[in-house]
Image (tube, helix red, strand yellow):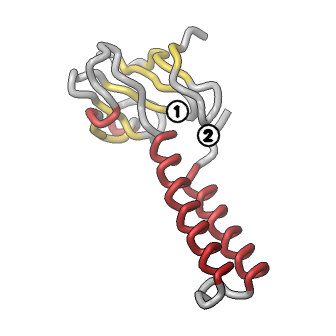
Amino acid sequence: MKSIPKAPLIAGGAVLAVVFMVKVFGSVLDLERPDAIVAAILFVLFLVIAACGWLFINLPPTCESRVCRPKDYSIIGRAQDLGIPGYEPVLQCRCGHRYLRRANRFFSINSRNYLQKYMVKSNWYSRWKPDHS
């Protein structure tokens, strides 16, 4: 199953919000009307919540040694450049473990560049769980 990119969904939601505001209130920038001010505030609030949610959804799990958190990962290159099939970015935690994310799965990369199942998400808003499949 292929992952749905979140950025176009957020952008699409923002465009729909603007279209809705124009249809209902006549103008997005008519700030003399109280209902337009409320609509503008709701629109900005929607964008902030969507951006925070998108960032939270895309955080990697803790590393295998349970020491490194999402902020401790860095991108060390693309999978293809490191001899692994695919174009996804390869992440490395402070401990030195390497990882690859494909759709809703998070793989550990061993010293021979083989992918080993590590974590999985059942859907886009769920938490990471050990991958025993």
Does 8 appear above or below 6? below
Residue found at x 63% / y 45%: 4
Mark 1 Cα-neighbour bin, 10 Å: few <14, some 14–19, many ≥20: some
Helix, strand or loop status at disc 2 = loop
Q: Amino acid at mark 1?
A: Arg
Residue found at x 26% / y 19%: 67
Q: Which mark is residue 102?
A: 1
Is 68 on the left or on the right of 20, as rendered?
Answer: left
Which residue is outermost to the front?
Answer: 34
Residue found at x 45% / y 22%: 107
Q: Are marks 1 and 2 in contact (CB under 8 Å)?
A: yes
Is 1 on the left or on the right of 102, as rendered?
Answer: right
Image quarter for residue 112? Answer: top left
> Residue 51: horizontal and vertical position, in percent?
49, 54
Does 92 appear above or below 12? above
Q: Which mark is residue 3?
A: 2
Helix, strand or loop status at disc 1 = strand
Does 93 appear above or below 23? above
- Name the N-terminal-most of marks 1 and 2: 2
Residue found at x 78% / y 79%: 24
